[in-house]
Image (spheres, grey):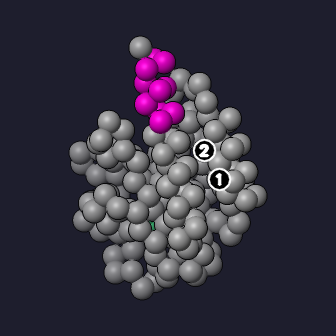
Amino acid sequence: MEYKEIILSLKNLIKDVKYDVTILSNTSAFLFGNLNNINWVGFYLTKDDGMHLGPFCGKVACMFLPYNKGVCAKCATTKEAIIVKDVHEFKGHIACDSNSNSEICIPLFINNKLYAILDIDSPIKNRFNDNDLKNLKEIVNILETEILKSQILLD
Ligand code: SME
């Protein structure tokens, strides 16, 4: 599916949902089913002690990631998205699925506070480019808006 269609469908899928976990769960399944050459899509929730596994699709993954090692850690500590063309060349990369060869991480912020990392793995080297980055950032913006709204729906 093209990003344009993915974004439109995702907006419909997650609007007026009450719980963040519900939004993140179906977003993982939706991206996993509609992005090409992907073997893992999910969210790590950024807590004080480190990053805890959230909703995802793919093989069983590391349930806890520290802030001082790995691709997600780099994304969380710099608060910037990161594309890793070849995970085997990234010092400290944490391999959850041995099929992964490239990776992209994008931070999510709620009320200006780091909230989660969207992490996507591919079995292909150099899978992610600037177009993926631009569109996935737009998806993350939609998630941030809907999660913020979901908190208001809960009140
Ligand atoms: N590769 C990540 C760990 C998470 S898995 O890819 C699902 C990292 O180095 O932080």
Position of the N terminus by quadrant: bottom right
Residue beneath disc 1 = 31
- Which quarter holds ligand 1? bottom left
Which labelled disc corresponds to residue 94?
A: none
**Which stretch appears magenta?**
145-154
Magenta part, dominant SS: helix
Mark 1 residue crowding within 10 angstroms, few (<14) / some (14–19) / many (20+): many
- Circles 1 and 2 in contact, beta carbons < 8 Å: yes
Outermost bottom residue: 89
Image point 59% across, 24% down: which residue? 16
* Residue 151 located within the stretch drawn in magenta: yes
| Residue 62 visible in the displayed image | no
Left or right of 28 on screen, residue 84: left
Residue closer to the observer: 4 or 35: 4
Tell me the quarter of the picture where residue 82 sits.
bottom left
Q: CA distance from mark 1 to mark 2?
A: 6 Å
Residue beneath disc 2 = 27
Q: Secondary structure at mark 1?
A: helix
Left or right of 11 on screen, residue 144: left
Image point 56% across, 80% down: which residue? 126
Count of residue discs = 2
- Whole-percent x and y of residue 149? 47, 26
Outermost top residue: 155
Is residue 122 shown above or below 35?
below
Left or right of 46 on screen, residue 127: right
